[in-house]
Amino acid sequence: MDTTKIRLKTNLIKDKIFLGVVFFLSLLVVIPLVWIIGYIFLRGIKGLSPLLFVKDQNQGGILNALVGTFLITGVATLIATPIGIMTGIYLSEYKNRFSSFLRMIVELIQSIPSIVMGLLAYIWFVVPLRSFSALSGGIALALIMIPVVVKNTEENLRLIPSILKEAAYALGAPKHEVIFKVLIPCSLSGITTGVLVGMSRILGETAPLLFTAFGARILHTNILKPMETLPTLIFKYATSPVDEWISIAWATALILTVTVLLINFLSTVIVKRWKVKL
């Protein structure tokens, strides 16, 4: 009996030690994040003003960059979402040599640095068209976003119990109806979250846009012309010797950071509220 009590106490002590180690290591992850966000907030809040949101760069604002970021990210999302979802469905539901090859290609694309994606988009689209454009930037960002959507879609579809598919097949439903009427509705929240995560992934990309969208100091909505974005504006202003531009760069960094955090928060809310209980 004493031996059992001693062993129980020893296990409790080991459990507390393990919990303390895990908590400490988790804290090491949180501290840099809090420090970075706090530093950006302290530096960026000083440069925030209503004029930033209503004037373009020529007038001391960032309205053109806000609109450019919205349009280019929208173009990338419109391109990447259907391709990523359909590819994820194929990888999840069809097991053959081509699916194995396709999975390898997706993983390869995911491992390619973003600056290389920008260079490829420059060669494929900017050079033939002989002009920088927001459309080229959107395509470059779509190439980065597609693997994120593919992986997320595939993993969410694999989480669906096979009994649901078997029941649908038993009722005589063809494969395409099983996919569109059973699998996708059951994993819709997860797929939507994957799209939002992909958007937050590309929002802060700078290198691909320097090769494609390039930038424009005036406000316009023509995606066939060069267009400014928040990341490229930060890059240009942060390296400037002008103090006012550096202040705007910090304010823009704060806006971009808050936007990414809000998108990630939205994805969490979607998962919790609209997840289908199986």
Image: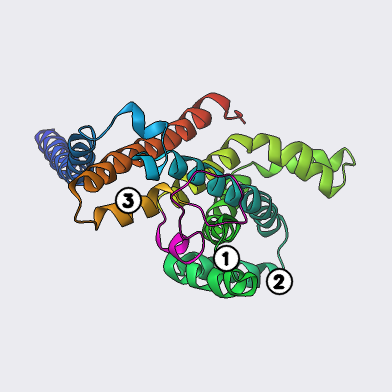
Residue tagged by mark 2? Answer: 98
The magenta stretch is 205-227
Q: Tell me if residue 135 is in the magenta stretch.
A: no
The three-letter amino acid code for the residue at tag 1 is Val
Which label's residue is closer to the chain start, 2 or 1? Answer: 2
Mark 2–mark 3 contact, CB under 8 Å? Answer: no
Task: Give the side of residue 216 with respect to residue 220, left or right.
Answer: left
Crowding at label 3, few (<14), some or many (≥20) Cα neighbours within 10 Å? many
Please state the total of marks drawn on the protein image: 3
Residue 14 on image: x %, y %: 14, 42
Q: Is residue 96 above or below residue 34?
A: below
- Which label was assigned to residue 234? 3
Crowding at label 2, few (<14), some or many (≥20) Cα neighbours within 10 Å? few
Question: How far, Cα to Cα, is label 2 from label 1?
Answer: 12 Å
The residue at the point 23 percent across, 37 percent down is 44
Residue 88 on image: x %, y %: 64, 54
Residue tagged by mark 1? Answer: 106
